[in-house]
Amino acid sequence: MADIIDKNSGQTRTKKEIEAISEKIKASRLGINDIIIPLASGIILIMLALFVFVPMVKSAINFRGEYREIKEKEEALTNLEAQLKSIDEGTFQIDLLNAKEVIPKTLRVSSFMYYIDTLANEKRLTSRSLSAGDIQVTVSKTVEDEKEKKSYLGVSGPLAYNGTLENILDFLDSLYSASPYIISSENVSLRQSGEEWRVTLNVTGYYVPEGTITADLYAPFTNYTRYQDIVDIFGQKAEKLR
C-alpha cells in the first residue's frame, strides 16, 4: 500500500514539474508587448536626439563661433582705439585741411589750367593747344582684381607747347610742383620742328566730391603718417592756395 502511495506522489510531483517547466517556456516566449515597448522607446530616443540634443549641440557650436568672433572684434576695436589715440589731433586737423585744399570737392577747368599755362609762360613756351574737360578714372591694384577697383573724378585735357628743348625740359621738370593740385601726366611726346621743339601731353588734375562713406571699423588700420612724404607734399601745395 505504501508503494502505491509513493508511486502516486512521484507522479504528482513529476506532473507539477512538467507544468512548471511548461509555464516557464510559455513565459519565455517573445510577445507583441516585448517588441512594441523597446521599439517605442528607441523611436522616442531617436526623436529626442533629433529634436533636442542635435539642436543643442549645434547651438553650442554656433555660440562658440560667435563668442570667438566677438572676442576678435573686441580686440580689433581695442587696437584701433590705441592707434587713433596715438595720432595728434591738432596735427591731424591741419593735415586734413591741407588734403582737402589740394584735392578739392570740385575743380574748375579754368582753375586747373591757370597754373599750368602760367608755368609755360614763365618758361617762355608758346601754346599750340589748350583744352580740358571732366573725366572719370578707374584704377585697380592688379588687372585681375576687379573688387579693388576705385574710381576718381578729374579734369583732363591735351596740351601742346613750343619752345627750346631746354625750356621744355625745365617745364616738364616743374610741372608737378607748379600746380597746387594733385596732377598726373601721360602720353608725353617731344618732336623737333625746325629750330624749335614741340611737346604734347595729357594732364589730369583730380578732385573728390563730397559723399557719404561707410567705414569698416574692423578692417586693417593704416596710420596716414606712414606716408609722411605725401603729407608734406600736400602741405607745400596747400601753401600756394593761401
Image (cartoon, rainbow, N blue to C red):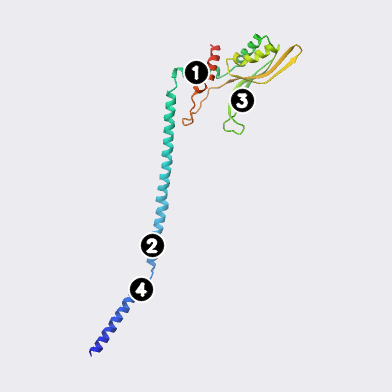
The residue that label 1 is drawn on is: 95
Q: Amino acid at mark 1?
A: Asp
The quarter of the rendered structure image containing the N terminus is: bottom left
Q: Amino acid at mark 2?
A: Pro
Disc 1, disc 4: CB below 8 Å?
A: no
Q: Secondary structure at mark 2?
A: helix
The amino acid on which the numbered mark 3 sits, given as a three-letter code, is Val
Under mark 4, the amino acid is: Lys
Q: SS for tag 4?
A: helix
Q: Position of residue 35 (x, y in %)?
A: 40, 65
**Pointer 1 with pointer 2, Cβ within 8 A:** no
Cα gap from disc 1 to disc 2, whole angstroms? 79 Å
- Confirm or deny contact between disc 2 and disc 3 (CB under 8 A): no
The numbered mark at residue 36 is none
Q: Which of labels 1 and 3 is toward the front?
A: 1
Q: Which residue is mark 4?
A: 26
Where in the figure is residue 105, as x and y percent of width and height? Answer: 55, 19
Question: Which one is closest to the eye, mark 1 or mark 2?
Answer: 1
Whether residue 219 is situated above or below residue 15 in the rendered picture: above
Residue 101 in view in this figure:
no
Where in the figure is residue 140, as x and y percent of width and height? 59, 29
Q: Earlier in the sequence, mark 4 or mark 3?
A: 4
Q: CA distance from mark 1 to mark 4?
A: 99 Å
Residue pictured at 31% horizontal, 76% vertical = 20
Q: Could you tell me how far apart the alpha carbons at marks 2 and 3 are, in whole angstroms?
A: 75 Å
Indicate which disc, 1 or 2, sits on the residue closer to the N terminus.
Answer: 2
Q: Mark 1 packing: few (<14 Cα in 10 Å), some, or many (20+)?
A: some
- Do the residues bearing badges 4 and 3 touch, measured as CB atoms within 8 Å? no
| Location of mark 3 (residue) | 137
Above or below residue 15? Residue 206 is: above
* Tag shown at residue 38: 2
